[in-house]
Image (cartoon, rainbow, N blue to C red):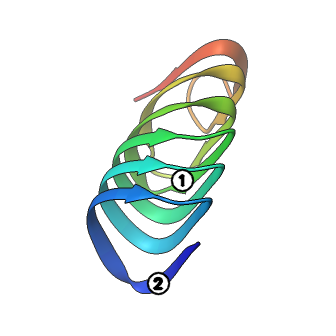
Amino acid sequence: FVADEAEVKGVQITLTNWSKGSDGIQLAFANLVKEFNGLQMALANVARDSGVFQIGILNFARQNSECVQLGLLNFNDGFLPFFPIFNLSL
């Protein structure tokens, strides 16, 4: 479990990633991050204010997000707020 108010850069591999900001790669059961740039791989991915590539069962990207999502359920604030399998927000 990573819970951090500071920004994290690099690779995070844990059960749950929870951080204020991060750049790099997150591999976990669940990724929860406020500001993120990079790759998230987990069962559930949540990112806000991000430039992200998400792979998981549930993917959420909110607000100022530029993202590519691959997963069963994909949610973002782009042209298609919800789309299964693949979603894109620019």
Residue tagged by mark 2?
Answer: 4
Picture coordinates of residue 28, whole percent (x, y): 56, 50
Q: Mark 1: which amino acid?
A: Ala
Q: Residues within 10 Å of mark 2 (few under 14, many from 20)?
A: some
Foreground label between 2 and 1:
2
- x, y percentage for residue 26? 43, 50
Please give left or right for residue 78 compared with residue 20 in the image.
right
Secondary structure beneath disc 2? strand
Above or below residue 55? Residue 52 is: below
Q: CB of mark 2 within 8 Å of CB of mark 1? A: no
Which residue is rendered at x = 60% and y = 39% of the image?
77
Q: Residue at x 69, y 38 (%)?
A: 43
As measured in the structure, the alpha-carbon distance from the residue carrying label 2 to the one carrying label 1 is 15 Å
Q: Between disc 2 and disc 1, whose residue precedes?
A: 2
Query: Three-letter amino acid code at disc 2?
Result: Asp
Q: Residues within 10 Å of mark 1 (few under 14, many from 20)?
A: many
**Which quadrant would the N terminus be assigned to in this image?**
bottom right
The location of residue 87, given as percent across then percent down, is: 57, 19
Check disc 1 and report the residue beneath it: 47
Q: Quadrant of the C terminus?
A: top left
Q: Of residues 89 and 15, which is closer to you in this image?
A: 15
User: Which residue occupies 39% across, 59% down?
Assistant: 12
